[in-house]
Amino acid sequence: MKSYVKEQIREILAAAFEMSVQDISEDISTDTVPQWDSVTHLSLIIELEETFGISLDPEDVPLMTDFRMILNKLQKYDVSIKKRE
């Protein structure tokens, strides 16, 4: 996956959890971020769908609980950055 996609995911995670992009590592997960609750998770999913112009399969959503799994699941959608209008 291209590095600009990883960087975009870092920015989305940082915004969702009100953290600095520099604090978002590939080790981030629901276990390491106290504010990663069900409401924040849904906001994160919506932002990922809007940013990448995709619709995630409902069975993928609950599995996307860490940075690596988000990357893994997004690979099947062949994501690219969608320009906002």
Image (cartoon, rainbow, N blue to C red):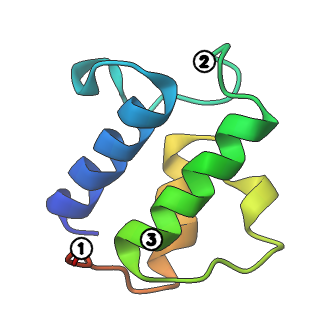
The amino acid beneath tag 3 is Glu
Residue under label 1: 84
Marks 3 and 2, the one that precedes in the sequence: 2
Give the quarter of the figure containing the N terminus. Answer: bottom left
- Distance, label 1 to label 2, CA atoms, is 28 Å
Q: Nearest the camera: 42 or 74?
A: 42
| View extreme (front): residue | 85
Q: Nearest the camera: 54 or 2?
A: 54
Marks 1 and 2, the one that precedes in the sequence: 2
The amino acid beneath tag 2 is Val
Q: Name the residue: 60% across, 58% down.
A: 45
Residue 65 seen in the figure: no
Residue 59 placed where, x, y %?
83, 72
- Distance, label 3 to label 1, CA atoms, is 9 Å
Residue 29 seen in the figure: yes
The total number of labels drawn is 3
Quadrant of residue 32 in the image?
A: top right
Residue under label 2: 33
Residue under label 3: 50
Within 10 angstroms of label 3, few (less than 14), some, or many (20 or more) residues?
some
Q: Are marks 1 and 2 in contact (CB under 8 Å)?
A: no
The amino acid beneath tag 1 is Arg
Q: Name the residue: 26% across, 53% down.
A: 8
Q: Secondary structure at mark 3?
A: helix
Q: Nearest the camera: 23 or 83?
A: 83
Query: Position of 29 compared to 11: left or right?
Result: right
Specify the label residue 68 is tagged with.
none
